[in-house]
Amino acid sequence: MNIGVFLVLDIYPRRGIILLMKKDIQRGLVRRLKIIEGQVRGIQKMVDEDKYCMDIITQTSAIRHSLGAVEEKILENHLSTHVIEHIKAGKHAHATKEILSAYKLARKK
């Protein structure tokens, strides 16, 4: 059974919520974000060097896909930690509001 180690990533003073994420998930996300950062620098170089437009568009599409994967993983973590905790604490309206908010954001893609 893999229980995992939790790490406090950030504190939202406005809401008083501590963001918890498994350490292996965090490492994976940081790795993906560093790759995306490198891809963005690559696109900047391609634009500076006046590369073929379709090659640039191919790279921007890859970045969008990668960011989508990061977003999905963070959303999965949020739903399986924070929203579950709200439900357990009897804050059903707040949990519902967050689920609907996530749904609306996902539909904007």
Image: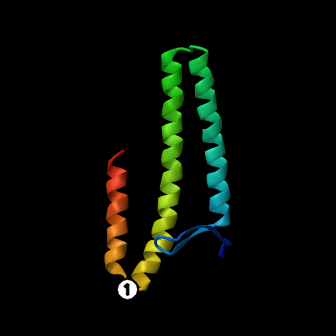
**Residue at position x 63%, y 31% in the image:** 41
**Residue at position x 52%, y 59% in the image:** 74
Is residue 3 positioned above or below 106 on the image? Answer: below
Residue 82: percent from left, percent from top: 48, 73
**In the image shown, does 46 or 79 lie closer to the viewer?**
46
Residue 51: percent from left, percent from top: 57, 15
Does 18 sit left or right of 75 as displayed? right
Screen quadrant of the C terminus: top left
Amino acid type at circle 1 is: Gly
**Residue density around tag 1, few if under 14, some if 14–19, many if 20 or more, within 10 Å:** few
Screen quadrant of the N terminus: bottom right
Q: How is the image coloured?
A: rainbow
Quarter of the view holding residue 95? bottom left
Quarter of the view holding residue 21? bottom right
Residue 104: percent from left, percent from top: 32, 55
Q: Which residue is mark 1?
A: 90
**Residue at position x 59%, y 20% in the image:** 46
